[in-house]
Image (tube, coloured by chain):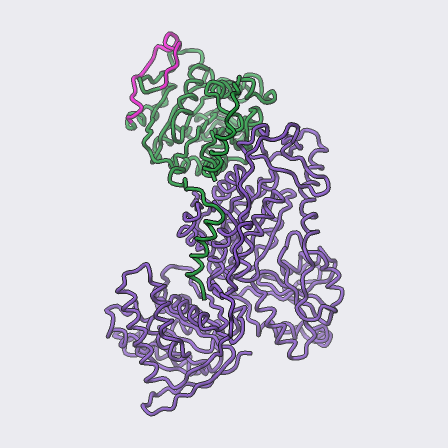
């Protein structure tokens, strides 16, 4: 899909010929020190591109610190925008065009393998003549390293240009860069201006006006000096779409789901959900409660759920760990609760701003004692919106905890999705307040489904004390040993009953079977499906399947798996590789979904996983698929263990 | 939501039930004979009858420990949660349903040890509820371990040579937190004072923190011996704005006049632990209550969709 780009003329010439190339798929990156606004630039560029009809996926590159040391490779802050002539479902492979505000952040991206060979780079040239001779030396050395790597580098006097409009180019270079990109990609300037006004609507009008001037300056400079423009054909799309990131989708999805109380404690990368809610929730009668800690956030949400409508809490891995005891209580006392876990790298503080899918098993099995509950993972930004309604309804219907596993890729990824047609029913009804009929018990479990009706404070005749202790149907502490067995069965049965309502997942590719089936979950869907389609184009017999409900698992998996010679998962979590020292078939630590599927299906599910702190790249998945084809594995048998 | 609920409740409010103490009494409490928890349970049931609180609109929230079994012995709604975390649950209940009467029952391990963070912040939130600290200076349910309020030198199974550190003073700590609005101390062996304190705490609009001095008949039976046996070792705080417990004047002759509006004096009185002081240390009705800032008008599903559609425009392409 992606193609190698032609080069850009390095030396501007007044009578140069401007070449226009049409490509179906291309990635652009803007990188800077923190605080220079690269992300804002990319967000506006992405939004305008989506409005013009391109498929778009943007992903932010965020350092862990607010302001890491300037001009450091590890401090690169930026954004990648992938454009396509069809829907774009993931961040793609490497970047084709980069704008960098200094050579060090660019080196950071280069050393991580973020840039395509031959990529075009627009690099701020001010460092060449910087008063500090050390910086000059760094710049020359950096430039050399980048040139040796084969990038086509265009030095751009961004600072010098911006100073004609602003006093502090740190506040403005991003808009100049946006101007250059707008020229290079033939963006509609009126739309860009409109988007800038929208992005800075909370600032003084002078800010927008200044940014418009910078935009025009960058556009004009590019028109005068650059020799290449690209066209990414647009789609004819009549259906209205929304463009937002996954955390914004979770926030607005929570509103659409009728949720009214979000309890949280700040944690990256989940917090922006509460920023969004903090901004808008009051307009819906909703409350964001910032608790004193993660535990209290769970407690407040549970207390609110206990007294009325289901509430929710938002967190990431370390917060999940802290909430564990409360989740057990909600499951035991059968109090509905939605928990959004926006996963990041772990364990411990791990990679706070980077994606990982390592919370799966902890989300499923992390609560001591037998604690059956529902785990669901949205795979797209659109699903981040809709999953909230599903989660609330399931939590209330089953009186249990529903964990929503999003991740940093979805949280900061921005892509258009069809504008939802909202229904009042998604919000659920008001809580019950009528008196409880005589003789009804607070856990009057239906023996077939384990489901029972919840009594809320205010309902006369329903007075009882919920408890985390083992209890009987009347919520009385269980002193009889058989009660615990029965209550455990009832809580577990709810999951089996719910699983019976799920559909078997669709196979992407050959439903009737083939050589290899790739199974994924969560945010990797787009990358996996793109990789599978590339591999199929190469003639490989590969299909894929994506799992939305991880607990309970959907029906039909074992039957589907049986139609393929080999089944493997592709995940962003750690696994031992075959051939690692001391690693055997028995002690091998596998990808988390593969572990789960092996137990559930008794199929020897292999895995390919990476924890590089970035979303999976389709090209790397394709390589993995080639290596894992049953034929390739047979050929490799007996050969030396491949280098990793 | 709360608004619509209140309206419906008002519509249903046509019964003229009169509640007796028995209407609030659940199963027989399984606490040891002589446990101070019994006195508190009785005082609470008496308060509910006195105030004619509807059992269905009253919620007792507790954590874990002997005293946290409390809600099970009430015939109201109850929430017996996890160790140290009663206050966040109670806060959630009040945020969702401000019209409910919420009581929180905690032991000393619950409140000032494992749940200390929630205690400090609950004081600051000042959500309208009654928080009872049933302080017997020891972990009872787990069989005699040192708690933060165990007196220095007092022997336990975890510190057999005696508690190493000076005991924590929960009143002093509570009075030190910004936005504290009601701080009182009472004792299980003075039932009239206990009842009067609960009554004042319930009447207060805000977070009413009541420390109840208690003996554990097994592990700290002698801990307040001097004060129990000699009323002269007890000082009652008295003031027209304070807690009045008629009939105690003859027995408790040591009385200190203390205006509960005076937080500096309250802190001084709380700090000095040479005698047992019972009464209202501090009250301020004007402190902001967190749930007030959170009370929002109800929105219908159609209203919400209208606003959401408007918000979508910001993201529309």
- Residue B311 located left or right of residue A541: left
- Residue depicted at x 35% and y 32%: B180
Q: Colour of chain A?
A: purple
Foreground residue, A198 or A62? Answer: A198
**Outermost residue, top side:** B250
The chain letter corresponding to green is B
Q: Is residue B45 visible?
A: yes
Q: Position of residue B264 (x, y in %)?
A: 28, 28
Quarter of the picture containing the C terminus of chain A is bottom right
- Residue A98 located left or right of residue A391: left
Q: What range is drawn magenta here?
A: B243-262
Residue A490 counted in the magenta span: no
Residue B252 counted in the magenta span: yes
Q: Main SS type for the magenta part? A: loop
Q: Is residue A520 above or below residue A628?
A: above
Q: Position of residue A173 (x, y in %)?
A: 32, 71
Quarter of the picture containing the N terminus of chain A is bottom right
């Amino acid at each position: 899909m992606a193609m190698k780009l032609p080069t850009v003329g390095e030396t501007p010439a007044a009578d140069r010929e401007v070449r226009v190339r049409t490509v179906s798929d291309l990635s652009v990156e803007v990188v800077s020190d923190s605080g220079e606004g690269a992300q804002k630039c990319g967000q506006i560029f992405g939004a305008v591109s989506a409005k013009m009809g391109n498929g778009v996926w943007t992903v932010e590159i965020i350092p862990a610190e607010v302001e890491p040391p300037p001009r450091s490779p590890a401090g690169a802050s930026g954004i990648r925008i992938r454009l396509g002539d069809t829907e774009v479902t993931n961040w793609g492979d490497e970047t084709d065009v980069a704008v960098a505000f200094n050579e060090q952040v660019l080196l950071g991206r280069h050393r991580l393998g973020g840039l395509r060979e031959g990529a075009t780079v627009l690099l701020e040239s001010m460092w060449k003549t910087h008063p500090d001779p050390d910086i000059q030396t760094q710049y020359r050395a950096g430039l050399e390293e980048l040139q040796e790597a084969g990038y086509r580098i265009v030095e751009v006097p961004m600072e010098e240009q911006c100073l004609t409009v602003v006093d502090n180019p740190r506040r403005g270079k991003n808009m100049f860069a946006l101007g250059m990109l707008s020229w290079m990609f033939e963006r509609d300037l009126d739309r860009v201006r409109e988007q800038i006004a929208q992005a800075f609507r909370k600032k003084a009008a002078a800010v927008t006006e200044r940014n418009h001037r910078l935009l025009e300056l960058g556009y004009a400079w590019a028109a005068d000096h650059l020799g290449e423009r690209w066209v990414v054909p647009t789609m004819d799309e009549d259906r209205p779409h929304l463009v937002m990131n996954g955390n914004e989708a979770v926030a607005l999805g929570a509103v659409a789901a009728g949720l009214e109380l979000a309890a949280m404690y700040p944690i990256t990368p989940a917090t922006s959900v509460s920023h969004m809610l903090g901004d808008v929730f009051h307009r819906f009668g909703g409350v964001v409660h910032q608790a004193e800690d993660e535990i209290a956030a769970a407690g407040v949400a549970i207390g609110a759920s206990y007294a009325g409508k289901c509430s929710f809490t938002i967190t990431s891995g370390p917060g999940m760990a802290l909430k564990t005891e409360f989740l057990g209580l909600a499951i035991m006392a059968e109090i509905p609760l939605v928990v959004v876990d926006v996963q990041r790298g772990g364990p411990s503080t791990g990679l706070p701003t980077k994606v990982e899918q390592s919370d799966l098993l902890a989300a499923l099995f992390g609560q001591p004692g037998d604690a059956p509950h529902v785990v669901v993972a949205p795979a797209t930004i659109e699903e981040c919106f809709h999953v909230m309604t599903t989660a609330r309804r399931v939590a209330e219907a089953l009186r249990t905890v529903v964990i929503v596993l999003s991740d940093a890729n979805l949280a900061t990824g921005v892509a258009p999705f069809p504008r939802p047609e909202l229904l009042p029913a998604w919000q659920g009804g008001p809580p019950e307040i009528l008196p409880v009929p005589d003789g009804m018990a607070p856990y009057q479990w239906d023996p077939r489904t384990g489901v029972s009706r919840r009594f809320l404070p205010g309902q006369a005749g329903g007075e009882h004390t919920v408890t985390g202790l083992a209890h009987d149907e009347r919520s009385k502490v269980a002193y009889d040993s058989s009660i615990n067995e029965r209550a455990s069965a009832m809580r577990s049965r709810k999951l089996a009953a719910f699983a019976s309502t799920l559909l078997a997942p669709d196979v992407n590719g050959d439903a009737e079977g083939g050589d290899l089936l790739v199974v994924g979950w969560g945010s990797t869907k787009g990358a996996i499906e793109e990789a599978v389609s590339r591999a199929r184009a190469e003639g490989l017999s590969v299909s894929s399947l994506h799992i939305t409900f991880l607990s309970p698992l959907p029906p039909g998996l074992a039957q589907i798996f049986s139609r393929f010679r080999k089944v493997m998962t592709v995940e962003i979590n750690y696994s031992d590789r075959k051939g690692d020292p001391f690693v055997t078939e028995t002690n091998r630590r596998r990808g988390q979904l593969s572990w789960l599927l092996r137990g559930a299906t008794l199929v020897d599910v292999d895995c390919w996983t990476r924890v590089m702190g970035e979303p999976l790249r389709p090209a790397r998945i394709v390589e993995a698929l080639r290596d894992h084809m049953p034929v390739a594995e047979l050929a490799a048998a007996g050969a030396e263990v491949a280098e990793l | 939501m709360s608004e619509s609920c209140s309206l419906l409740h008002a519509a249903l409010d046509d019964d003229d039930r009169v509640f007796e103490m028995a209407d609030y009494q659940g199963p027989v409490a399984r606490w040891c004979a002589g446990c101070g928890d019994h006195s508190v349970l009785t005082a609470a049931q008496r308060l509910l009858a006195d105030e004619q609180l509807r059992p269905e609109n009253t919620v007792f929230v507790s954590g874990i420990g002997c005293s946290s079994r409390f809600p099970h012995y009430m015939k109201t709604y109850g929430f017996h949660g996890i160790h140290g975390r009663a206050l966040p649950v109670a806060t959630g209940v009040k945020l969702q349903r401000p019209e409910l009467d919420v009581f929180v029952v905690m032991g000393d391990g619950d409140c000032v040890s494992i749940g200390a963070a929630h205690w400090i912040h609950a004081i600051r939130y000042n959500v309208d509820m009654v928080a009872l600290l049933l302080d017997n200076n020891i972990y009872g349910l787990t069989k005699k371990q040192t708690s933060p309020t165990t007196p220095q030198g007092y022997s336990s199974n975890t510190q057999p040579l005696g508690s190493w550190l000076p005991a924590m003073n929960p009143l002093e700590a509570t009075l030190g937190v910004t936005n504290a609005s009601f701080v009182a101390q009472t004792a299980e062996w003075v039932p009239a004072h206990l009842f009067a304190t609960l009554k004042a705490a319930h009447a207060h609009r805000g977070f009413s923190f009541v420390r109840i001095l208690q003996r554990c008949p097994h592990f700290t039976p002698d801990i307040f011996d001097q004060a129990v046996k000699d009323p002269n070792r007890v000082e009652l705080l008295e003031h027209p704005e304070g807690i009045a417990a008629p009939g105690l004047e003859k027995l408790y002759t040591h009385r200190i006049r203390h205006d509960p509006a005076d937080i500096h004096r309250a802190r001084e009185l709380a700090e000095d632990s040479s005698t047992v002081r019972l009464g209202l240390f501090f009250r301020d009705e004007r402190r902001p209550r967190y749930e007030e800032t959170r009370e929002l008008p109800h929105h219908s599903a159609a209203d919400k969709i209208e606003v959401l559609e408007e918000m979508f425009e910001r993201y529309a392409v």
